[in-house]
């Protein structure tokens, strides 16, 4: 089976690299590189270094990811041989995340059998739960697209929203089918380990952001300095915003997690990433129990009192006021976990951290 998988991987890589311009195909029988940590970022604002950072740049600069591997994706892959960290920029959205992670997972140049995966990105946060710059370790990853929908102007009067789960009769029908992509669940014990390891990590405070967040007078947590928490994620290709959809997101995560999850972060990629990791786990390319999700708050998912959802959304289109703080806290907290894994690799290579604490 392993020989078959390697042959298929070589064919896949050959086709991938052949589609790239100015890339020489050099696949041989060398042993694949054993990667310790895969850092999954979703976007970069400009260059890979030297300008305003997106999700990838701080890692690239501070972790000296100086070895570049050609890759048919948004960016080439960046690696540091001394630490064993490999970073990818998937591109925004579930489709790009899924295809990029699948392409990476099947790449025969790397061995991911012992790799830890850290999805590290910014997100919109529910102001009920957290403040700008706060970070959340997620366990339940809910898809915000895979469903049936009726325009709110045509829905039955007794439906609160026009969204219903597939193969059900009413919104939040308790007789929902087994999920097939609607929700994924990261290793909860590993998420809790990561949270306990990082929950007291000092995070930087931006006084201007704190002053701006004071507008959220009905949400005490939104007015706090940044902090670390547990909180779950919804992923959707549609960038939604507003109090009504924020209430829907809370209900949707609660529904698909059977009341065990708590909506905190809204992004666009997690269910695509975990769909690919699920398939890769089935063929032994990765261990999905080693995958973690960390999101930091760059903005809120609804406006403060006195501001319309449309006005707030349009203002955010000009740029998130909290993006620089969010990528910094993302790096700080993510680094604590990565360093713990790397510093104790002789233990964590074969034993999950949650089992040792």
Image: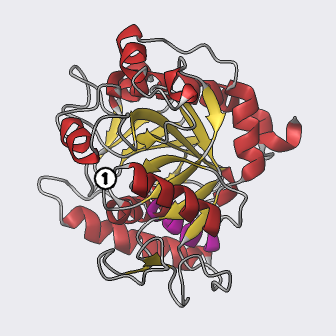
Q: Nearer the viewer, residue 181 or 39?
A: 181
Does 335 lie within the magenta span? Answer: no
Location of residue 251 in the rendering, given as x and y in whole percent from the top left corner:
57, 61
Tell me the colour scheme of the image.
secondary structure
The part of the chain drawn in magenta is 272-283
Place of residue 310 in the rendered image (x, y in percent of width and height, measured from the top left): 22, 47
Image location of residue 354, percent across then percent down: 81, 42
Residue 52: x and y in percent read 23, 23
Q: Is residue 224 above or below residue 265?
A: above
Q: Nearer the viewer, residue 160 or 234?
A: 160
User: Does residue 223 lie above or below 112 as drawn?
Assistant: above
> What residue would you read off at disc 1?
92
Q: Is residue 260 left or right of residue 4?
A: right
User: Which residue is at a point 64% across and 18% down the rendered structure image?
Assistant: 201
Report whether residue 29 is seen.
no
Q: Residue at x 56, y 40 (%)?
A: 37
In the depicted structure, whether residue 310 falls above or below residue 280: above
Look at the image and tell me in which quarter the N terminus lies: bottom right
Which of 285 and 204 lies nearest the eye of the viewer?
Answer: 204
Instruction: Name the foreground residue: 325 vs 172.
Output: 172
Q: Is residue 281 left or right of residue 259?
A: left
Magenta span dominant secondary structure: helix
């Amino acid at each position: 089976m392993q020989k078959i998988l390697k042959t298929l991987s070589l064919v896949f890589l050959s086709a991938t690299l052949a589609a790239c311009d100015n890339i020489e195909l050099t696949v041989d029988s060398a042993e694949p590189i054993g990667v310790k940590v895969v850092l999954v970022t979703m976007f970069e604002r400009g260059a890979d270094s030297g300008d305003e950072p997106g999700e990838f740049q701080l890692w690239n600069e501070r972790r000296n990811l100086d070895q570049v591997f050609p890759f048919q994706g948004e960016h080439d892959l960046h690696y540091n041989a001394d630490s064993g960290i490999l970073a990818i920029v998937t591109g925004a959205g579930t489709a790009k995340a899924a295809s990029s992670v699948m392409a990476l997972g099947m790449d025969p140049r790397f061995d991911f059998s012992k790799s830890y995966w850290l999805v590290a990105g910014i997100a919109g946060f529910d102001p009920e739960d957290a403040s700008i710059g706060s970070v959340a370790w997620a366990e339940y990853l809910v898809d915000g697209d895979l469903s049936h929908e009726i325009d709110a102007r045509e829905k039955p009067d007794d439906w609160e929203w026009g969204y219903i789960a597939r193969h059900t009769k009413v919104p939040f029908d308790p007789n929902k089918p087994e999920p097939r992509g609607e929700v994924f669940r990261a290793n909860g014990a590993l998420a809790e380990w990561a949270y306990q390891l990082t929950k007291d990590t000092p995070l930087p405070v931006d006084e201007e952001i704190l002053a701006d967040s004071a507008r959220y007078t009905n949400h005490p947590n939104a007015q706090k300095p940044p902090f670390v928490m547990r909180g779950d994620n919804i992923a959707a290709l549609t960038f939604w915003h507003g109090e009504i959809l924020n209430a829907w997101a809370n209900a949707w995560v609660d529904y698909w997690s059977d009341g065990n999850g708590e909506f905190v972060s809204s992004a666009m990629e997690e269910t695509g990433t975990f769909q690919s990791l699920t398939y890769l786990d089935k063929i032994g390319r990765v261990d999905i129990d080693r995958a973690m999700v960390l999101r930091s708050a760059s903005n809120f998912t609804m406006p403060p009192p006195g501001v319309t959802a449309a006005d707030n959304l349009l203002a955010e289109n000009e740029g998130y006021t909290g993006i620089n703080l969010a990528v910094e806290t993302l790096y700080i907290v993510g680094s604590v976990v990565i360093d713990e894994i790397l510093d104790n690799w002789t233990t964590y290579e074969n034993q999950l951290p949650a089992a040792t604490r």
